Image (cartoon, rainbow, N blue to C red):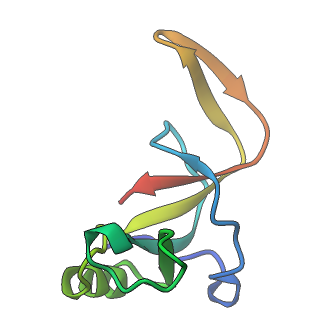
Amino acid sequence: MYPKVKDINEIGNYPALVKAGGGYVWDEVLEYRVWCHPEDGAEDLENGDDYFYVFAEYNDALEFSKKTKGAEEPIALILQEEYIDEPESGKYIHMKEERLTEWPV
Protein backbone atom coordinates (compact mmCIF):
# COMPACT_ATOMS: atom_id res chain seq x y z
CA MET A 1 0.00 0.00 0.00
CA TYR A 2 2.92 2.37 0.67
CA PRO A 3 5.64 3.08 -1.91
CA LYS A 4 8.79 0.99 -1.85
CA VAL A 5 12.09 2.78 -1.34
CA LYS A 6 14.16 3.52 -4.42
CA ASP A 7 17.26 1.56 -3.33
CA ILE A 8 17.24 -0.49 -0.13
CA ASN A 9 21.06 -0.49 -0.10
CA GLU A 10 21.13 3.31 0.22
CA ILE A 11 18.86 3.78 3.25
CA GLY A 12 20.73 5.46 6.05
CA ASN A 13 23.15 7.22 3.69
CA TYR A 14 21.15 10.41 3.19
CA PRO A 15 21.71 13.64 5.15
CA ALA A 16 19.73 14.25 8.31
CA LEU A 17 19.06 17.89 7.47
CA VAL A 18 16.82 18.26 4.44
CA LYS A 19 13.83 20.40 3.44
CA ALA A 20 10.63 19.83 5.38
CA GLY A 21 6.95 19.83 4.62
CA GLY A 22 4.77 18.69 1.80
CA GLY A 23 4.80 19.41 -1.83
CA TYR A 24 2.89 18.97 -5.02
CA VAL A 25 4.94 16.24 -6.76
CA TRP A 26 7.41 13.57 -5.73
CA ASP A 27 9.60 11.17 -7.65
CA GLU A 28 11.00 8.57 -5.25
CA VAL A 29 10.78 7.51 -1.63
CA LEU A 30 14.36 7.12 -0.41
CA GLU A 31 13.64 5.87 3.12
CA TYR A 32 11.14 6.03 5.94
CA ARG A 33 12.32 7.80 9.09
CA VAL A 34 11.23 7.78 12.70
CA TRP A 35 12.56 10.74 14.66
CA CYS A 36 13.16 10.23 18.39
CA HIS A 37 13.19 12.99 21.00
CA PRO A 38 14.98 12.48 24.34
CA GLU A 39 13.03 15.37 25.86
CA ASP A 40 9.89 13.28 25.21
CA GLY A 41 11.30 10.12 26.77
CA ALA A 42 13.36 8.55 23.96
CA GLU A 43 16.67 7.00 24.95
CA ASP A 44 19.40 9.67 25.00
CA LEU A 45 21.83 8.43 22.34
CA GLU A 46 23.04 11.79 20.98
CA ASN A 47 23.79 13.92 24.07
CA GLY A 48 20.26 15.31 24.22
CA ASP A 49 19.89 15.88 20.47
CA ASP A 50 17.11 14.38 18.38
CA TYR A 51 17.98 11.44 16.11
CA PHE A 52 16.22 9.09 13.73
CA TYR A 53 16.04 5.46 12.67
CA VAL A 54 15.64 4.51 9.02
CA PHE A 55 13.43 1.83 7.50
CA ALA A 56 12.93 0.34 4.07
CA GLU A 57 9.21 -0.23 4.67
CA TYR A 58 6.56 2.02 6.16
CA ASN A 59 4.88 -0.71 8.21
CA ASP A 60 8.15 -1.52 10.01
CA ALA A 61 8.64 2.18 10.75
CA LEU A 62 5.09 2.51 12.06
CA GLU A 63 5.45 -0.51 14.34
CA PHE A 64 8.72 0.88 15.74
CA SER A 65 7.23 4.34 16.33
CA LYS A 66 4.25 2.91 18.21
CA LYS A 67 6.39 0.92 20.64
CA THR A 68 9.18 3.49 21.17
CA LYS A 69 8.77 6.16 23.81
CA GLY A 70 9.56 9.65 22.51
CA ALA A 71 9.22 8.63 18.84
CA GLU A 72 7.24 10.50 16.19
CA GLU A 73 5.07 8.84 13.57
CA PRO A 74 7.06 7.83 10.47
CA ILE A 75 7.83 10.29 7.72
CA ALA A 76 9.13 9.66 4.21
CA LEU A 77 12.36 11.04 2.81
CA ILE A 78 11.48 12.06 -0.73
CA LEU A 79 13.62 12.79 -3.77
CA GLN A 80 12.05 15.39 -6.02
CA GLU A 81 13.66 15.83 -9.43
CA GLU A 82 11.24 18.66 -10.21
CA TYR A 83 8.88 20.44 -7.89
CA ILE A 84 6.53 23.37 -7.65
CA ASP A 85 7.76 26.04 -5.26
CA GLU A 86 5.31 28.42 -3.59
CA PRO A 87 7.48 31.22 -2.16
CA GLU A 88 4.35 33.16 -1.26
CA SER A 89 0.71 32.22 -1.16
CA GLY A 90 -0.66 31.76 -4.68
CA LYS A 91 2.68 32.29 -6.44
CA TYR A 92 3.89 29.04 -8.05
CA ILE A 93 7.26 28.43 -9.68
CA HIS A 94 8.14 25.22 -11.57
CA MET A 95 11.61 24.24 -10.34
CA LYS A 96 13.74 21.78 -12.35
CA GLU A 97 16.32 20.76 -9.78
CA GLU A 98 16.68 17.94 -7.29
CA ARG A 99 15.86 18.37 -3.65
CA LEU A 100 15.42 16.07 -0.68
CA THR A 101 12.51 16.69 1.63
CA GLU A 102 10.72 14.96 4.49
CA TRP A 103 7.00 14.48 4.03
CA PRO A 104 4.21 13.09 6.17
CA VAL A 105 3.29 9.64 4.92
Q: Is residue 105 above or below residue 35?
A: above
Residue 104, quarter of the rendered image: bottom left
Identify the residue shown where x is 34% and y is 88%.
Answer: 60
For the residue pair 44 and 23, the one nearer the viewer reads as 44
Q: Is residue 94 above or below residue 80?
A: above
Percent across and percent down for residue 57 are 42, 83
For the residue pair 1 and 41, the one nearer the viewer reads as 41
Q: How many numbered discs, if any? A: 0
Q: Residue furthest left?
A: 66
Q: Is residue 22 above or below residue 9?
A: above
Q: Is residue 89 left or right of residue 67?
A: right
Q: Residue furthest right?
A: 97
Identify the residue shown where x is 46% and y is 11%.
Answer: 89
Percent across and percent down for residue 83 are 64, 36
Residue 22, quarter of the rendered image: top left
For the residue pair 80 and 88, the one nearer the viewer reads as 88
In the rendered image, which quarter contains the C terminus? bottom left
Percent across and percent down for residue 13 are 71, 79
Identify the residue shown where x is 45% and y is 53%.
Answer: 103
Percent across and percent down for residue 30 are 60, 70
Identify the residue shown where x is 26% and y is 77%.
Answer: 41
Residue 6, quarter of the rendered image: bottom right
In the rendered image, which quarter contains the N terminus? bottom left
Q: Is residue 2 left or right of residue 41?
A: right
Q: Residue furthest front?
A: 47
